[in-house]
Amino acid sequence: MWKFLLPIFAFIALVVFFALGLKPDRDIRALPSPLIGKTAPVFSLPDVMDPAKSVGNAPLAGQVYVLNVWGTWCIACREEHETLLALAKQNVVPILGLDWKDERDRAQAWLAQLGNPYSAVAFDDKGNVAIDWGVYGAPETYLVDKKGRVLYKHIAPMTAEVWQREFLPRIAAAQKEST
């Protein structure tokens, strides 16, 4: 009798396990970041447009800023580009770009053709800085406060709705904080 019931119990246990694990109401973009609340990794990389220049986040110390990880190979990055251009025009905070695992000439052509929403763009061709930041894939956008702590991480294309709902309230609170 047990040899017939055991597979049924095993099947029921698997169904319960998967039902609890999948949680259809969870937000798939809400991947936890170990950096939230911690100091953002400091980096210095060559500039996408001028390899002789250095770009990093150290000059942004004491400011609230956004780091946007992107690449020309990333379809979703193209989706969010218009939004980033609009946000840059609002001039709320500096938007620092991190061109991840890309080709410099393609990145230069992308920015020349589509416009450049970034205050500066670092070229992370090997992906080492992205690893330090815990990047899963592009696009990812991080919000860093005046003290250099990562406040928020968004995984997916930036939209005006996400900017309004997730970023602006955090930016306002971070700008009110004393350094």
Image (cartoon, rainbow, N blue to C red):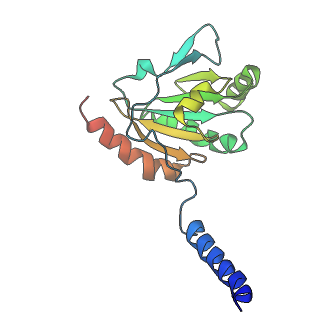
Tell me the quarter of the image containing the C terminus: top left
Task: Check the image and report above or below for 10 versus 69.
Answer: below
Q: Residue at x 70, y 84 (%)?
A: 8
Q: Quadrant of residue 10?
A: bottom right
Instruction: Give the mark count.
Output: 0
Q: Quadrant of residue 81?
A: top right
Position in image of residue 6 (x %, y %): 69, 83
Q: Nearer the viewer, residue 87 or 37?
A: 37
Position in image of residue 136 (x %, y %): 61, 41
Q: Visible in this render: residue 111?
A: yes
Tell me: 130 left or right of 1: left
Task: Check the image and report above or below for 145 versus 10.
Answer: above
Q: Residue at x 63, y 21 (%)?
A: 123
Q: Residue at x 70, y 22 (%)?
A: 108
Tell me: 141 left or right of 9: left
Q: Nearer the viewer, residue 67 or 44?
A: 44
Tell me the quarter of the image containing the N terminus: bottom right
Task: Check the image and report above or below for 150 versus 164.
Answer: above
Q: Quadrant of residue 98?
A: top right
Q: Visible in this render: residue 117?
A: no
Q: Residue furthest bottom?
A: 1
Tell me: 20 left or right of 60: right
Q: Nearer the viewer, residue 147 or 93?
A: 147
Q: Residue furthest left?
A: 178
Tell me: 89 left or right of 147: right
Q: Residue at x 72, y 20 (%)?
A: 104
Position in image of residue 101 (x %, y %): 70, 28
Position in image of residue 154 (x %, y %): 52, 46
